[in-house]
Amino acid sequence: QVHLVESGGGLVQPGGSLRLSCTASGSIFSINTMGWYRQAPGKGRELDAQITDGDNTNYADSVKGRFTISRDNAKNTAYLQMNSLRPEDTAVYYCNAIIRTTSMVFFMNWWGQGTQVTVSS
């Protein structure tokens, strides 16, 4: 079993910054891609940023130049540094990871429980 735990969400004023963290724990053999998704009220879940185990990154156009994804493989942790936040960034942010556990020979998709980010004055 694997658990992804996010932290770092909260209330911030427009133009402010937040740093989200996501730590994977459990019977982990290997972690491939880790990513951050958002889901605003009444909308579907959308990809913000991804990072591979080789540190290749991919960003949604709406966050390029403002958000930076990184990871610490020794800690099984991914981070999302969010700068120049806008009211439209308000959403629940979910961590995603593609993980192979010690009992499997294939990778599976795992999700965290989400953390609320609210950008408001």
Image (tube, rainbow, N blue to C red):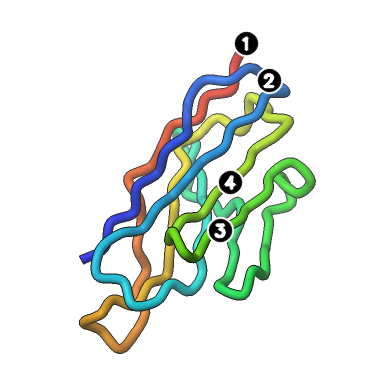
Q: Earlier in the sequence, mark 3 or mark 4?
A: 3
Q: Are marks 3 and 4 in contact (CB under 8 Å)?
A: no
Q: Pointer 1 and pointer 2: residues touching (CB < 8 Å)?
A: yes
Of the image marks 4 and 2, the number of the one nearer the N terminus: 2
Mark 2 sits on what residue? 14
Q: Which residue is mark 1?
A: 121
* Disc 4 from disc 1: Cα separation: 22 Å
Q: Earlier in the sequence, mark 4 or mark 1?
A: 4
Q: CA distance from mark 1 to mark 2?
A: 6 Å
93 is higher (above) or lower (below) than 35: above
Disc sitting over residue 80 in the figure = 4
Identified at 48% across, 74% down, the residue is 32
The structure residue drawn at horizontal position 51% and vertical position 40%, both measured from the top left corner, is: 20
Q: Give 2 or 14, whichever is nearer the viewer.
A: 2
Query: Percent position (x, y) of residue 5?
Result: 34, 47
Whole-Å distance between the Cαs marked 3 and 4? Answer: 9 Å
> Quadrant of the rendered structure where residue 2 is?
bottom left
Q: Viewer-proximal residue, 90 or 4?
A: 4
Looking at the image, which residue sits at the far bottom? 105
Q: Which mark is residue 71?
A: 3
| Residue 54 % position (x, y) | 62, 75
Tell me the element at label 3: strand
Q: Of label 1 and label 2, which has the lower sequence position? A: 2
Question: Disc 3 residue type?
Answer: Arg
Q: Name which residue type carries label 2.
A: Pro
